[in-house]
Image (cartoon, rainbow, N blue to C red):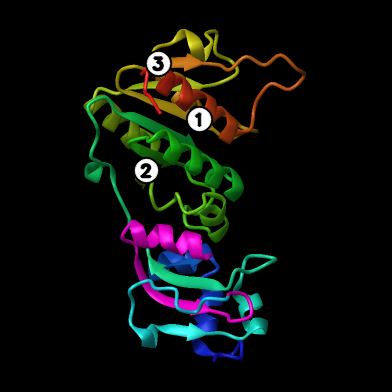
Amino acid sequence: MITSTQNPTIKKIIKLQKARERKKENLILIEGRHEISMAKSSRIEIINLFYCDQFTSDSRFNVDIKKELIENISPEVFKKISYRQNPEGYLAIARPKRLDLKTIKLSQKPLVLILEAIEKPGNLGAILRTADAAGVDAVIINDPRVDVYNPNVIRASLGSVFTNKIVVENSEKTLKWLKLNKINSYAATPSATELYTNKGYKNSCAIVVGAEHEGLSQFWLKKADFKVKIPMLGKIDSLNASVSVAILLFEALKQRKLTF
């Protein structure tokens, strides 16, 4: 059992809590049995598994790695490396998948989600849950303000960060890719004159959503094929980004007359 925070492995985990270290080492932290299971089912390579007997009743959780790579950690040390106020008792070090636009396989009439400058881990995680539920072909992130594999993103997404096809790319290359694949873009903005329900999403389309406070950049406001808005009847002029994404994606699914 690891009982000291000065243990080299624990020091490594603490370093990996920083985005720049995760990028440097090409490693991520996954906390929680469900999230680790989602990663495993998505063929994410699990490097190490750590557990704490006090927080979990099942130390036999199988992630198909060698027994010598599974470590028991004391409650005091596990609390130091956990992001959660009430830890479940499982944490893994894993190697993420890095995708690019060329590797994305599109359906016949793809539905794509483009996110620009989303900065809050909770929002990004919630959006990824919605994207998974809507079965989007890809999630493309422009000008990222938060690491896709931030442990809080993983937690908020309930592990759907691993089930989505996520690409981080700049706006110019994203637009070029859309044009190449004949995908129309729909920019969500309060300044639009048309309601989102007045547009058609039956064919290949990409929903483009920005951060709540700043909205979309001038690049997307000028380059998108269409601009749409969600009606706001109260005093505020915008919704949480995750709510906007859900409304727009499921409008597309409704128009495509998918059955559930």
> Which of the two residues, 242 or 87, is positioned nearer the viewer here?
87
| Residue placed under numbered mark 3 in the picture | 255
Magenta segment, which residues? 32-56
- Residue 162 position, x and y percent, is 40, 53
Where does the C terminus fall, quadrant-wise?
A: top left
Q: Position of residue 26 (x, y in %)?
A: 38, 67
Left or right of 235, for residue 4? left
At 46% across and 27% down in the image, what residue appears?
249
Compare marks 1 and 2 and give the one earlier in the sequence: 2
Q: CA gap, disc 1 to disc 3?
A: 19 Å
Q: Position of residue 176 (x, y in %)?
A: 28, 30
Looking at the image, tell me whether mark 1 or mark 3 is earlier in sequence order: 1
Is residue 79 visible in the rendered structure shown here? yes
* Residue at image coords 29%, 28%: 110
**Residue for point 37% across, 18% down:** 257
Q: Is residue 37 a member of the stretch shown in magenta?
A: yes
Label 1 Cα neighbours within 10 Å, binned few <14 / some 14-19 / many ≥20: many
Q: Nearer the viewer, mark 2 or mark 3?
A: 3
Q: Which residue is mark 1?
A: 209
Q: Quadrant of residue 49?
A: bottom left
Residue 251: give its label: none
Q: Amino acid at mark 2?
A: Glu
Observer-side mark, 1 or 3, equals 3
Q: Which residue is mark 2?
A: 169
Residue neighbourhood size for the residue with mark 2, other residues' Cα within 10 Å, grouped as few (<14), some (14–19), many (≥20): some
How far apart are labels 1 and 2 at the CA level?
A: 15 Å
**Element type where label 2 sits in the image:** loop
Q: Is residue 257 above or below residue 77?
A: above
Q: Is residue 216 visible?
A: no
Q: Residue at x 48, y 59 (%)?
A: 35
SS class, disc 3: helix
